[in-house]
Amino acid sequence: MIRQRQIHLRRGHKAFGDTKNRPCILVSLDIQNLKSNSIIVVPCSTNLAFFVPHLRVLLSKGEGGLKSDSIAICDQLAAVPKAYLIPEPFGMISVSRFEEIQQAITASIGLIL
């Protein structure tokens, strides 16, 4: 079952010239993950030069099954068809790290709690 906090590979969008499978973190609610044909994800990158404090979250190698140090690009939420996900997750990030991601998403849309 696809669950919030899991890290999956997302197939590349060939129409946009992206043919690489890329890791992403599922952030949509589990009920949406179950009932909808699309899910909401935060893309990840191994290019740490893209790090922006308060909008992106650093992830350590091994966290959630990641093979390299990475960043969660929380200011680039995306709705992705489930068919674009490779079914087997890498792993799941911790609740505390997910809370950091939620805070970064909130900051990226201008809501400060």
Image: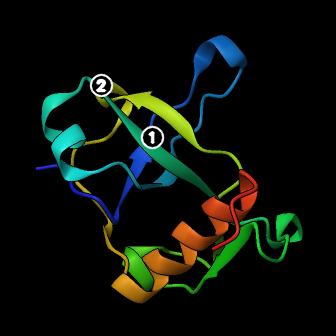
Along the line of sight, the residue nearer the viewer: 2 or 21: 2
Which quarter of the rendering shows the C terminus?
bottom right
Give the secondary structure at mark 2: helix
Q: Is residue 104 above or below residue 31?
A: below
Q: Residue at x 78, y 65 (%)?
A: 47
| Residue placed under numbered mark 1 in the picture | 10
Q: Which mark is residue 83?
A: 2
Q: Percent from the top left, x then y, of residue 42?
A: 54, 52
Q: Is residue 58 above or below residue 29?
A: below
Along the line of sight, the residue nearer the viewer: 30 or 43: 30
Please indicate, yes or no, whether residue 73 appears anywhere in the rendered image. Answer: no
Measured in 3D between alpha carbons, the distance from the residue under mark 1 to the one under mark 2, in whole angstroms, is 9 Å
Q: Which mark is residue 22?
A: none
Along the line of sight, the residue nearer the viewer: 109 or 89: 109
Q: Percent from the top left, x then y, of residue 62?
A: 45, 85
Which residue type carries mark 2?
A: Ala
Q: Is residue 73 above or below residue 100?
A: above
Q: Percent from the top left, x then y, of residue 37?
A: 25, 23
Kindly check if marks 1 and 2 are in contact, taking CB atoms under 8 A apart as contact. no
Around disc 2, counting alpha carbons within 10 Å, would you say few (fewer than 14), some (14 to 19), or many (20 or more)?
few
Which residue type carries mark 1?
A: Arg
Q: Residue at x 65, y 58 (%)?
A: 74
Q: Residue at x 28, y 51 (%)?
A: 29
Along the line of sight, the residue nearer the viewer: 85 or 110: 110
Quick check: 15 left or right of 87? right
Please indicate, yes or no, whether residue 23 appears anywhere in the rendered image. Answer: yes
Image quarter for residue 64?
bottom left
